[in-house]
Amino acid sequence: MRVLIDLTRCQGYGQCAFLAPDLFTMHGNEAVLYDPDPDDSQRENILRAAAACPVQAMHVDRMIVQHRHTPGPDSQGAAAFKRDGRIVIVGASLAGARAASVLRREGFTGSLTVIGDEAHAPYDRPPLSKRVLTGGVPAEHTTLPRLKKQIEGEWLLGAPASGLDLARKVVRLADGREVPFDKVLIATGTRARPWPHADQAALEGVHLLRSMEDSDALRQALARRPNRVLVIGGGFTGSEVASVCRELDLPVTVIERGSAPLSGALGGVIGKIAADLQRENGVDLRCGVSVTELQGDADGRLRGAVLSDGATVEAEVAVVALGAIRNVEWLHDSGLAASMWGVACDAGCRAVDVNGLVTDDVFVAGDIARFPHPAFGYQFMSLEHWGNALNQAEIAAHNMVSDQARRWPHLSMPVFWSTQFGVNIKSVGVPTFADQVMIAQGSPAERRFVAVYGYQGRITAAVMFDHGIWLDFYQRLIERAAPFPVDFRHADQAANDKPVAAQTPERIMPAAGATVVVTGHDPAERRVSFMRISP
Amino acid sequence: MAPQSVFKQIIDPDSRADPYQFYSELREMPVRREDDGTYVVSTYREIVDLLHDPRISSDRRNLARPAPGEDEADVMPSLSFIGLDSPEHDRLRRLTMRHFGPPHTPGRVTGLIPEMKRIVTELIDGIADRDRIDVVDDIAYPLPVGVICRILGVPHEDEPRFRVWAEAIVETLGPGEVDRAAREKRRVETGLQLSEYLKGLVDARRSTPNDDLLTGLVTYEGPDGRMTPEEIVRTAGLLLIAGHETTVNLITNGMLTLLRNPEMLERLRAEPDMIIKTVEELLRFDPPVHFLSSRVALADIEIGGVTIPAGSPIVLALAAGSRDPAHTPNPDDFDPDRPYNEHLGFGGGVHYCFGAPLARLEAQFAIGQLVARLRNPRLLSDPPPYRPSSTLRGPRHLMIAYDGVLPAAPSW
């Protein structure tokens, strides 16, 4: 059986852990851990657990859809396209797979091709930095429910795309094949940013964490009980790896260039709480420094690292967790506005070309999409969130087979979660889109609280530590542009907190990194060309 | 005379057999102010929003104007975590959960499955030589009582005593502020008798601990400290009453609904796994708890086009919300095949039903086995007589006849 819990929706009621305790485990008060590929003998317990979920967040063998959607009558053109059109999806991870299933749900019966660079059926990545690393779940158990097998289409897996020719409407594959399309969805996502020095990166013991293979290799390395694990980068992936190391009782050092772990995403104030959490749990956390060199022994095995403050750390395993690089290289000659920040698109997921013109037949979804969000000043953003991949792929797929008048804008509120050191962290809105932050509910000392972020007097985000049950409330406040600071009386522990500077990183301006040259005189001639900045 | 409000019609005992006929009218105004200042909320979205709204208190001491006679001294003895807010609620609930479920005792409820199954089998074996029973007295009541006594560590032979108290307390619960003072008074009186009884048990556990939940509450001391003797008595009283008075309605309502839908009865015999989704649909379609009636607004709350002023009592009409057509297609159809069944049967938010997993399993086993084992079961009276409470709503008796009892399947 295949089980997938939508942890964006999960509110930590624990009903699954009550009814199928062998399969679902509460980690701390709110986070649920589970095996996505349980034995069929557990069928009855799984059905009980899935039925009992108060927010119906559990998908068993297929992806359920929460909202109702009754498609209206199609125009002749849309109906014909749904019947006979050719759609190619490039990218076979969560967004690509989700789009494929939504296309079929929407009644698309034409030809569907899904191209993926990895040889695996689509799988779920969040467990790769958590339970797979502890050995709690085998990496290959993370395959997504009801995807490759059940969705009728051609799945070209292990076949990386190498180019997109919009004039001829074909996707070129690295093996020389060409796949023609009427409409194409770009969902090639991201990859882990490698250690910049290739010779050091090649040392045995230096790991990246993005794919199933990465996770399995790191799990094996941790199982050999290294003298110390060095985590380079205190973002979510790095912090989750550090949490796993402590769970396995391995010494771990986290190197974070910023003022605190998670500060890039959550700002320095909440980052400070995350730092305390790490130190309480025995992490050797060093902030404000970076790794300048990874050193190996004569046999090419990692021995340790030199830091920017001159200190050295001995470690047999290093995990490079420096964020992600968007997989845009294959689009370089496509004429699309594809840069290190992603592929620009409109709110309806239609790709924008380098001139700023919206295309009609090219759509983008998932980590690679860079779209304007009206709730955040129309700022172009790309969100590397599980829930965004799911929601945006649905919007893109719907719009691919819909008339102009029936298209949907991608307006879902960004939500993400992380589980580390027994605490479930959830975020709604955009915490970096803030100038102030305050504790609205609960107690930071008890690691159970809601932090609310404000920007120019309105609420723009909320971050919860073991307080996920309140997420929807704050989401509505953000959606309504409710005033900040909040000052209502509430039924939770009173934090009596005053707003303070959020200490968020400087925001990336829409134009940053996208330097263009405008040429031509007449309107018919004027064009933009992109000056590419390599990542 | 002004026409009676639809809400008053619903809580009128004459409407007990079918309150659903009034719920669509109730939902026409999602947030409705009653003459006594109570706000009744009846649509799904608005109820869910308020269940997750930190500005809503479960502690009636926050009312702007306490109901006449409801002063603090009277309310205090009945306060268990159901009527408290954070941090007291969280602490007491955590201290109780520690002995009942995850994260600290994850296998407790599933560990009781063999015992639940044994009780169900014995109860149905016990009616094998009859041709008619009262589902309430013969099955639906004894099962949850047996289970909760076992969990808590309350002697089953004392059952006749606390049955009286439990019923008396339930009759005092409910929406409406008018006669609340009198009801509170009765509740406090009965509560004192129950407390005296439980105090005795608690003292006994202190000297002779064993493996039950009561012992856990008495002996455990952790990061949250330990419960005071008063807190233990209140918590045990809450669990005992809730364990008595809710699942009985779920099982009885379930049998009534299935006997009114014979094609579903047939399907359940052919597909026993369907009982899981059937019970879930029962929780939506004919739930044991119709109202949450002790919530209080702590701030002015804008919802459903209305501003609920701070200090106002709020009633959440869960059963009306679960049948909101804006949330569920064809909500008045009993349809266990619903692909997506998100309902309010156990409430929601931090006060989500503590015993939900027990109730689900007990109902699945009791209803599943009655369907599997009774030959040609049929209703003897429809509608059956109902108990007075509009909040914890269910039949007083449910008389059915049948043509025999099949033996229990060996594999079950």
Image (cartoon, rainbow, N blue to C red):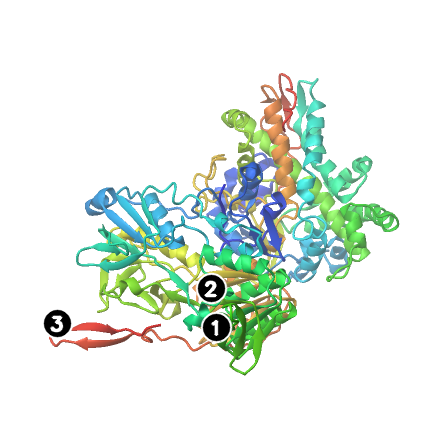
As rendered, which of B170 and B195 lies closer to the eye? B195
- How far apart are labels 2 and 3 at the CA level? 46 Å
Furthest residue in direction right, as rendered? B207
Is A370 above or below relative to A396? Answer: below
- Residue for badge 2: A208
Side of A230 where A457 appears, left or right: left
What amino acid type is highlighted by mark number 3? Glu
What amino acid type is highlighted by mark number 2? Leu
Number of marks drawn: 3
As rendered, which of A69 and B62 lies closer to the eye? A69
- Residue for badge 1: A264
What amino acid type is highlighted by mark number 1? Gly
Output the chain of dot 3.
Answer: A
Secondary structure of residue under mark 3: loop
Is there CB contact under 8 Å for labels 1 and 3?
Answer: no
Q: Nearer the viewer, mark 2 or mark 1?
A: 2
- Residue for badge 3: A525
Q: Position of residue B347 (x, y in %)?
A: 58, 48
The C terminus of chain A is located in which quarter?
bottom left
Furthest residue in direction front, as rendered? A298
Is A108 above or below relative to B313? Answer: above
Q: Position of residue A368 (x, y in %)?
A: 35, 62
| Residue at (78, 40) in percent of width and height | B162
Disc 2: CA contacts within 10 A as few (<14), some (14-19) or many (>=20): many
Disc 1: CA contacts within 10 A as few (<14), some (14-19) or many (>=20): many
